[in-house]
Image: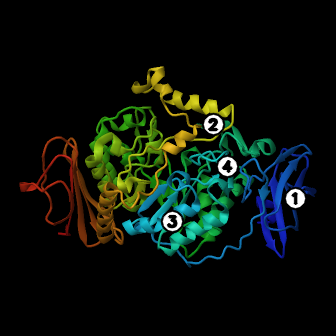
């Protein structure tokens, strides 16, 4: 690929830099480097590019047709935020820990928001030894691409190549990844390739054909992935995070909003070709449950079916997307444990056929969770599961998540049963701040609990500083006795997983069946043994007919004659017949 077709500013060596911008609506483009205007010749197909001497750290912008001045859409450093100048970034970080990654089956994922969990990249790094000590093997960062203001979930990023300056500089982020690798921990990054945020995006003025006018998404006009320059923008971005920052993988947000699907195949093929010999993991969020993507290059998918069925089973909630699970949550969960997805091509309550057959995929292709940023933060008041159902039932959810052969994910605070809410927060300027506030409240108008306008008005203002402050979830203090008890329990739980599941080379479903309307049992062949789980969230004892084996974990006192008490879980292991 020529430098003229590589977005942004990149060092060439010997003090030389390449600069390139795709601006098909522009007549001419200038590089404003440290205040000096320099012409960027047209290279054809909408590209403008130049090469010249510059110093790392120098500030620059692009000026379009003599009037519009913008940050580099592929800026790799925005020290003054999205409205400030871009800065040239050197690539001379001295990595301390040689690293080729870890196999995916060993992943135990901890998802966090940098700002809410710790504040900065450096302070997240300070939490890593504690996370490793309880058995976490993979850190997943919510998106860090530059966004407007100082606080945002990250899904409103507008400069996808530049780590958010609110958390530190690019070297700080590399140091976080480096430190994690030194502890044997993978680091995954959530990236958003399906849309840009509503404020601060420089592309709209210079590349209107970056978007499609014939397709819309929940966030507005769809990105036009048919355009070679658009594909290049996102594929090079993925490669930057994986090569320059040495992330171990990417979680691709809402790929059901990406069309055509051929872009996803191109992305994973180029990533695999560029990084041979490394364990690199590409994980999808995909409402369409396309098992075919998991059979053709992608590592795994976030399995909302697991969460949704389990949540309905524990809480009885049946509105919104929970409606698709309300008619038999235990049966939906049974199918998840046996086959991967609950929805594999059936028509849901909205009349939409959803999913593809997943029964032939290994369990590690599915990431399961009882909480994550969406499932907590998209609630009106950001309540965590422990707040909704209490500690006993929350512990059942954590244990079931940890002890399936699927890959478990835990949300920040979950290992110590944190009860702090995780709210939706932003930092927009007027008038967008008011639009987002009222839009957020309007989202909940269809729900029975928010029919009254006063109830909706009580939903936290996303733009208020207090909303972010209430969402902070720091690592617990050493003298927090309740948190210490939970962390010890969580550590023991993950030790069971490591002993019996994490290193298995072959896992296959044996059986999953309902024991009662709110109880089920599932088993897998794990190498040369059987692994069994049974859970009862009903109000009555249930009768099991367990296969022979040794109990290795339980919640709830054992009962005679193979019975399982209410709100109990048991795991046992036995030889294959």
Q: Residue at x 49, y 31 (%)?
A: 459
Neighbours of disc 1 within 10 Å: few (<14), some (14-19), many (20+): few
Q: Marks 4 and 1, Cα distance to the nearest angstrom? A: 34 Å
Q: Which residue is mark 3?
A: 126
Q: Position of residue 127 (x, y in %)?
A: 48, 63
Extreme residue toward the left, this view: 561
Q: Position of residue 13 (x, y in %)?
A: 81, 75
Front label number (2 vs 3): 3
Describe the element under mark 3 as helix, strand or loop: helix
- Which disc number belongs to residue 74? none
Colour scheme shown: rainbow
- Which disc number belongs to residue 34? 1
Q: Position of residue 307 (x, y in %)?
A: 37, 47
Q: Which residue is mark 4?
A: 225
Mark earlier in primary sequence (2, 4):
2
Mark earlier in primary sequence (2, 3):
3
| Tag 4–tag 3 contact (CB < 8 Å) | no
Q: Is residue 545 above or below residue 200?
A: below
Front label number (1 vs 3): 3
Neighbours of disc 2 within 10 Å: few (<14), some (14-19), many (20+): few
Q: Is residue 228 left or right of residue 392?
A: right
């Amino acid at each position: 690929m020529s430098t003229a077709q590589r977005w942004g500013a990149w060092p060439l060596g010997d003090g030389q830099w390449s600069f390139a911008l795709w601006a098909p609506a522009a007549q001419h483009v200038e590089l404003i480097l440290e205040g000096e205007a320099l012409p960027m010749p047209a290279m054809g197909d909408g590209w403008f590019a130049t090469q010249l001497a510059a110093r790392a750290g120098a500030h620059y912008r692009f000026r379009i047709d003599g009037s519009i001045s913008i940050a580099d859409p592929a800026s790799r450093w925005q020290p003054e935020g999205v409205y400030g100048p871009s800065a040239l970034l050197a690539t001379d970080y001295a990595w301390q820990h040689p690293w080729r990654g870890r196999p995916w089956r060993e992943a135990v994922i901890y998802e966090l928001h940098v700002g809410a969990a710790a504040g900065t990249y450096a302070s997240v790094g300070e939490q890593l030894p504690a996370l490793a000590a309880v058995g976490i093997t993979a850190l997943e960062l919510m998106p860090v691409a530059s966004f407007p203001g100082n606080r945002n979930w990250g899904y409103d990023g507008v400069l996808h190549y530049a780590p958010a300056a609110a958390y530190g500089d690019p070297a700080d982020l590399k140091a976080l990844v480096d430190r994690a690798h030194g502890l044997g921990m993978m680091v995954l990054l959530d990236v958003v390739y399906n849309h840009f945020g509503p404020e601060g995006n420089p592309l709209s003025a210079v590349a209107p054909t970056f978007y499609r006018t014939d397709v819309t998404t929940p966030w507005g006009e769809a990105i036009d992935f048919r355009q070679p320059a658009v594909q290049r923008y996102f594929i090079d971005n993925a490669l930057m995070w994986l090569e320059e920052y040495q992330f171990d993988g990417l979680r691709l947000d809402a790929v059901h909003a990406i069309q055509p699907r051929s872009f996803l195949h191109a992305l994973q093929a180029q990533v695999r070709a560029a990084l041979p010999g490394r364990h690199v993991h590409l994980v999808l969020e995909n409402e369409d449950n396309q098992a075919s993507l998991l059979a053709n290059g992608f590592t795994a998918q976030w399995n909302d079916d697991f969460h949704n069925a389990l949540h309905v089973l524990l809480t009885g909630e049946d509105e919104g997307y929970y409606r698709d699970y309300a008619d038999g949550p235990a049966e939906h969960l049974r199918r998840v444990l046996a086959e991967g997805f609950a929805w594999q091509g059936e028509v849901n309550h909205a009349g939409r056929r959803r999913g593809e057959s997943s029964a032939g995929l290994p369990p590690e292709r599915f990431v399961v969770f009882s909480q994550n940023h969406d499932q907590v933060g998209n609630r009106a008041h950001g309540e965590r599961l422990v707040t909704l159902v209490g500690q006993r039932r929350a512990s059942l959810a954590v244990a079931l998540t940890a002890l399936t052969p699927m890959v478990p994910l835990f949300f920040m605070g979950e290992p110590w049963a944190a009860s702090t809410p995780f709210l939706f927060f932003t930092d927009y300027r007027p008038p967008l701040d008011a639009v987002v506030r009222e839009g957020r409240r309007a989202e909940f108008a269809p729900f029975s609990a928010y029919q009254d306008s006063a109830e909706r008005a009580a939903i936290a203002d996303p733009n208020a500083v207090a909303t972010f402050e209430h969402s902070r979830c720091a690592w617990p203090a050493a003298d927090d006795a309740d948190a210490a008890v939970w962390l010890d329990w969580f550590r023991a739980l993950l030790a069971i997983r490591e002993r019996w599941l994490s290193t298995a080379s072959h896992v296959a479903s044996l059986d999953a069946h309902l024991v009662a309307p709110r109880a089920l049992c599932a088993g897998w062949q794990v190498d040369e043994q059987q692994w069994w789980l049974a859970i009862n969230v009903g109000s009555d004892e249930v009768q099991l007919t367990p296969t022979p084996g040794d109990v290795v974990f339980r919640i709830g006192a054992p009962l005679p004659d193979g019975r399982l008490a209410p709100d109990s879980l048991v795991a046992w292991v036995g030889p294959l017949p």
